[in-house]
Image (tube, grey):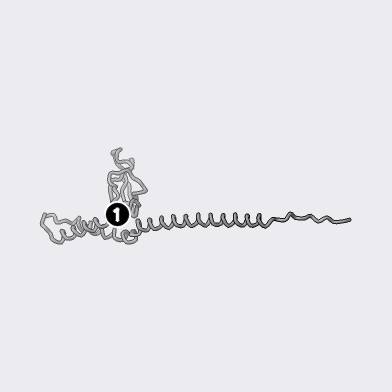
Amino acid sequence: MEEKTVKKPRVKKADKQAEEINELKDKLLRLQAEFENYKKRSKTELEEMAKYGAQGLIVPLLGVIDNLERALALKPEDGSNDKHFNGVEMIHKQFVEILKANGLEKIEAEGMKFDPSYHQGVMNEAVDDEELVNKVIAEFQKGYMLNKKVIRPTMVKIGIKE
């Protein structure tokens, strides 16, 4: 008995080259797309760094603002023109203006509806007035945002139903 060998069809050289060209085009398109994505990602990262890069410096300075405000709370009661007090007041004002110019803003809290995105509830107190329920009734530490991003929530007392 005679064995028949199945002949494979010969792939033409031109077909093989066309296939290689298509594969190379596909690789090129993928590489171009990856590069475009890389450029977009790099641009976004640079924008984020420019917007929030100062956060590492600003967050520790919030404690300095707190201390300046504590010093300002000790205003002389006799109404005298204390040069040291006036100096601290000027430093505080300049300090806050510089930080505001760099995107820092205070989070409003007292009297506002409690929002855990902006407020950190550390206490609550039963209130008679229905309008004060679930609202901030006292602020213990100011909160701040840097370019609309919360970098320190406000520590607050919240009114609750009796």
Give the quarter of the image for residue 18.
Answer: bottom right
Q: Residue at x 77, y 55 (%)?
A: 7
Q: Residue 70: where, in percent of width, then height?
A: 22, 57
In the depicted view, which residue is nearer to us: 76 or 130? 76
Is 63 or 138 nearer to us in this picture?
A: 63
The answer to whether residue 138 is seen in the rendering is: yes
> Residue at the spot x=58%, y=57% of the render?
24
Residue sticking out furthest to the right: 1
**Residue 11 appears left or right of 88:** right
Q: Residue 61: x percent and y percent?
A: 29, 60
Using residue 95 as the reference point, say whether residue 11 is left or right of it.
Answer: right
Name the quadrant of the C terminus: top left
Residue 148 spot, x, y in % from top left: 33, 50
- The residue wearing badge 1 is 104
Whole-percent x and y of residue 42? Answer: 43, 58
93 vs 109: above or below = below
